[in-house]
Image (cartoon, grey):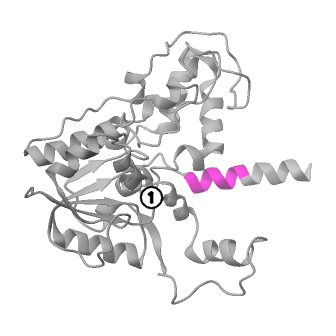
């Protein structure tokens, strides 16, 4: 039996990161021969936190249970990996930071046609924290593996490196590095939605006027979406360039590239991205590296969009 033991924990997320282990297919046999999986919510019925070499923690810190579980994992594990975009950046749950817990409770349990509960849950469910946080806002993290979920190739490399006692092989390239589409200057003059026609399979989405986040998203997926005709949605999180440079921003970087490749005005692209900011920042808005940027004003963008919508309705 290997000396390398693993605990996993599942906080506020969809379970996709745990399913990514199964996506290793036959390589999972190599992993199972090399490590001892102890605590794993989808495989074992262990309620406590035994000591382990490695702790894989998926999900964001959303409620009291998440905070408690993260702290217990940190106490029990020598190495903690923030596993998946929710743990690394806060993930889609981060959209909750635009609203208060009380507003969310009313929307989900009271002002909702699909529920009949007279009151939101109380002691039966862990209370929401005031904000959604990535894992490293609560505990120290040793390694980060973003992705929604991380591609099996990166999962296998990370676990293999830990077993072999070496540094994992990682890269800082964007999704574009693995995309075979060609960037070309075009005469496109209008921004398109994903439902507008069938994109050219050989040409960059930006060249065609489709919003694609591949150029601002770190490669932890090997670009399957662009390869299959779907623009990148940024699920692996922003590139290191955007995360670490205060004045670089997702919307302005995309706008800069698309405006150079088409005849669409840069300001029009920025405005379009701001109108759909909840989508384009959905994986990263909870991390301070995005949420605290001087360029990030999502609440104002949403207020402006609502004002425009109400003004249009009144007209």
Q: Is residue 123 above or below residue 202?
A: below
Q: To which quarter of the image does residue 72 belong?
A: bottom left
- The reply to whether residue 71 is visible in this rendering is yes
Identify the residue shown where x is 15% and y is 65%: 52
Quadrant in the rendering for residue 57: bottom left
Q: Residue shown at 32%/77% (left/top)?
A: 68
Image position of 95 with respect to 104: above or below:
above
User: Where residue 183 sits: x, y (%)?
Assistant: 50, 13
Give the magenta range. Answer: 298-305
What residue lies at 74% left-to-right and 27% top-to-bottom?
Answer: 196
Q: Outermost residue, right direction?
A: 315
In the rendered structure, the answer to whether residue 187 lies left or right of residue 205 reads: right
Nearer to me, 2 or 55: 2
Residue placed under numbered mark 1 in the picture: 15
Which quarter of the figure has residue 179?
Answer: top left
Asked whether, in this view, residue 187 is left or right of residue 143, the answer is right
Q: Is residue 256 visible?
A: no
Label 1: element kind: loop
Image x and y of residue 103, in percent: 63, 73
The secondary structure making up most of the magenta span is helix
């Amino acid at each position: 039996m290997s000396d390398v033991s693993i605990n996993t924990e599942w906080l506020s997320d969809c379970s996709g990161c745990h399913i990514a282990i199964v996506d290793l297919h036959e390589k999972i046999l190599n992993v199972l021969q090399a490590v001892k999986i102890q605590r794993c919510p989808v495989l074992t019925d262990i309620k406590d936190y035994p000591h382990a070499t490695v702790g894989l923690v998926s999900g964001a810190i959303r409620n009291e249970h998440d905070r408690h579980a993260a702290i217990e994992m940190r106490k029990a594990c020598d190495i903690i990996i923030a596993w998946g975009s929710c743990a690394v950046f806060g993930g889609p749950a981060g959209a909750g930071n635009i609203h208060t817990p009380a507003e969310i409770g009313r929307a989900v349990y009271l002002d909702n046609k699909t529920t009949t509960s007279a009151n939101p849950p109380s002691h039966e469910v862990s209370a929401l924290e005031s904000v959604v946080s990535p894992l490293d806002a609560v505990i120290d993290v040793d390694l980060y593996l973003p992705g929604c979920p991380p591609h099996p190739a990166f999962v296998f490399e990370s676990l293999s490196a830990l077993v072999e006692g070496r540094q994992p092989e990682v890269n800082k390239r964007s999704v574009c590095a693995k995309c075979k589409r060609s960037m070309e200057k075009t005469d496109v003059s209008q921004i398109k939605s994903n439902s507008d026609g069938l994109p050219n399979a050989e040409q960059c989405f930006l060249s065609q006027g489709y919003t694609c986040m591949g150029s601002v998203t770190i490669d932890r997926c090997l670009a399957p979406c662009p390869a299959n005709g779907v623009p990148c949605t940024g699920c692996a999180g922003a590139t290191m360039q955007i995360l670490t440079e205060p004045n670089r921003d997702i919307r302005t970087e995309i706008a800069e590239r698309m405006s150079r490749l088409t005849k669409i005005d840069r300001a029009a692209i920025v405005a379009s991205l701001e109108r759909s900011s909840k989508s384009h920042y959905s994986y990263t808005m909870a991390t301070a590296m995005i949420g605290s940027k001087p360029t990030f004003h999502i609440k104002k963008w949403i207020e402006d969009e609502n004002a425009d919508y109400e003004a249009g309705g009144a007209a």
